Image (cartoon, grey):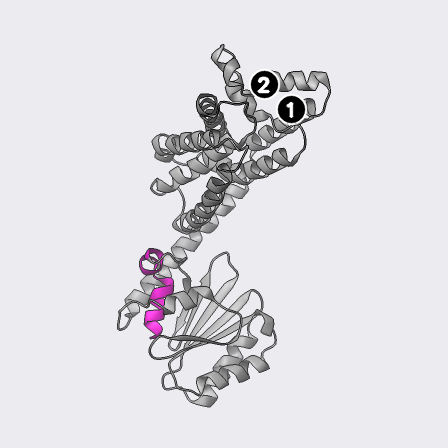
Amino acid sequence: MRDRLIAALADPDIAGKAGRNPAAVVAFHEAIAVLEWIGSGKGLVILDSAGMAGADLAAHLDRILNSHERGLLFVAVVGGDAEIAPALVAADARARDRDQLGLYHIDDTGKARRVAGRRLPELEKACRNLPPISRLSADAIAGIMERGRKERTEAMDFVRGSARRFPHVTVGIIVICVLVFALTAGNDPRAQQAFQLLCNNPDKVRQGELWRLLTYALLHDPTGPTHLIVNMLSLYSLGAFLEPLLGRFRMATLWVVSALVGGAASALFAGGISVGASGAVWGLVGATFGLLRGKNFFPVLIARDLRRRLVVVLAINIGISFLPHIDRYCHFGGGLAGYLIARLILARRPAARA
């Protein structure tokens, strides 16, 4: 049962196909396996109680729980009979930092029972669909550990490399948007004139004022800062992540093309005046999805986590796009442009070092 649990939680092929984030096996010693989910602050100790006397089990539990220093620690005792749950409750009562602990008993059928403390959804989900394996060989355990170590190293190198590069283009766009908002907000006639000159007006675009297909992305609702703040937070969140990977030139190109395509889609189909950086921001979302489809652009661990997060973000933004007064054509046009740029051009090249 212990080996089936380790495979369900830590084997990327099994956990990944089941839609779970695989844990990394960081230690394995006879009856004890130690797993962690990188970046989540969660650690799990799997303790096999087979052939273990009650006093030995209590000693193991006390040693594990009292060595805990930070993050969330979960302990799953595998196998054993009805005496396991009382032993876990007693160990929990003796532990120093009970608020950060979660204790489980996994019986011989694979059924998980939370005995004390916090819940670990990853463990509960894995126990509901354990793989049909009998036992992991020493080589298989070593392979899972090595794969986890390699993925952690790649992810940490990726994060360190990205963190060293300042997103100049992203911050520059944000500064320009803030300045343009300051110049076009309010009831001053000159501000209103500037707003009308720069917004995406389909009638004016058809008359040849094509600059509007880009300048609208620098404008925001002049009646209040909410529209600007939401878009700039989204832009920084995505831009600060993507720009260090793409480099300044490709980041600027991606933003401009996404804004242009979003503006063109709005002018063709929306039929009204449109402003805001949302189309370009959707381009960054689409580009991230496109890069995830490229081979080896992101480390496996980063790609796996990013894919899950983006699906949630995309679902929320699609819902928002159908609210009243939201230009969904601009959103979807910019998103499609970003995705295609990433698939056809960006994902074929290695990450920039600029």
Residue type, label 2: Leu
N-terminal label among 2 and 1: 1
Label 2 Cα crowd, 10 Å radius (few <14 / some 14-19 / many 20+): many
Q: Tag on residue 180? A: 1
Q: Residue at (54%, 21%) from the top-left corner?
A: 200
Q: Find residue 71 and report its horizontal and vertical position in percent.
A: 56, 64
Label 1 Cα crowd, 10 Å radius (few <14 / some 14-19 / many 20+): many
Q: Tag on residue 198? A: 2
Q: Find residue 44 and report its horizontal and vertical position in percent.
A: 46, 69
SS assignment at label 1 = helix
Q: Give residue 98's quadrant in the image.
A: bottom right
Considering only vertical position in the picture, is 151 above or below 71? above
Q: Residue furthest front?
A: 324
Front residue (pair 33, 126): 126
Location of the N terminus (image quadrant): bottom left
Majority SS type along the magenta span: helix
Front residue (pair 190, 233): 190
Q: Find residue 87 and report its horizontal and vertical position in percent.
A: 49, 85
Q: Give residue 325's quadrant in the image.
A: top right
**Which contiguous range is marked in magenta?**
1-17
Q: Residue at (51%, 15%) from the top-left corner?
A: 203
Instruction: Estimate the spatial distance between the alpha carbons at disc 2 and disc 1, rounded to whole Å.
Output: 10 Å
Residue 134 seen in the figure: yes
Q: Is residue 30 left or right of residue 40?
A: left
Q: Residue furthest top?
A: 207
Residue 189 among magenta residues: no
Q: Do the numbered discs 2 and 1 sit on residues whose CB atoms are within 8 Å?
A: yes
Front residue (pair 79, 138): 79
